[in-house]
Image: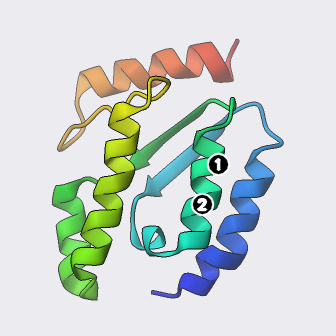
Amino acid sequence: MHLEVFEDLGIRLVEEAKAYDFVILDEIGGFEVLSDAFLDALMQLLQSDIPCIGVMKGEGPASNMIRKLGLGDTYVQRAENLRQWMRQDEHTLLYECAQFDPEGLRLAEEWVKKYANP
């Protein structure tokens, strides 16, 4: 629960990611969405031409984190806003599932073939 980590190291990592051909994001949509500065940097990356693939905390798994950390309505709204942006962005596929499934794996493998192993 240390936003300063996201606002320092997190932003630097997102900025450095722009130098690569593609970006892999793991477990976005957690506590870091409470940082305006980090969220701005992340959105700039997601709106760039750099292909990104990642995992975003779903509403179910996030509910445990919300309860444990007492994050409340602000967190819920910001995470939902991020998911909603992804749902509406024509260049983004937000594949939503509650657990591992073969279709999600197939989509990830297609992405890897297209962007990571051209």
Quarter that holds the C terminus? top right
Badge 2: residue crowd in 10 Å (few <14, some 14–19, many ≥20): few
Q: Relative to 17, is 60 on the left or the right?
A: left
| Residue at figure coordinates x 25%, y 67% from the top left | 76
| Residue at figure coordinates x 52%, y 75% from the top left | 35
Q: Which mark is residue 44?
A: 1
Badge 1: residue crowd in 10 Å (few <14, some 14–19, many ≥20): some
Q: Relative to 48, is 62 on the left or the right?
A: left
Q: Give amino acid for label 1.
A: Gln
Q: Which mark is residue 6?
A: none
Does residue 57 appear in the picture of this structure?
no
Q: Which mark is residue 40?
A: 2
Q: Which x, y percent locates residue 36?
A: 54, 71
Q: Give amino acid for label 2.
A: Asp
Q: Relative to 16, is 93 on the left or the right?
A: left
Q: Do the residues bearing badges 1 and 2 touch, measured as CB atoms within 8 Å?
A: yes
Does residue 54 appear in the picture of this structure?
yes
- Secondary structure under tag 2 reads helix
Extreme-right residue of the structure: 19
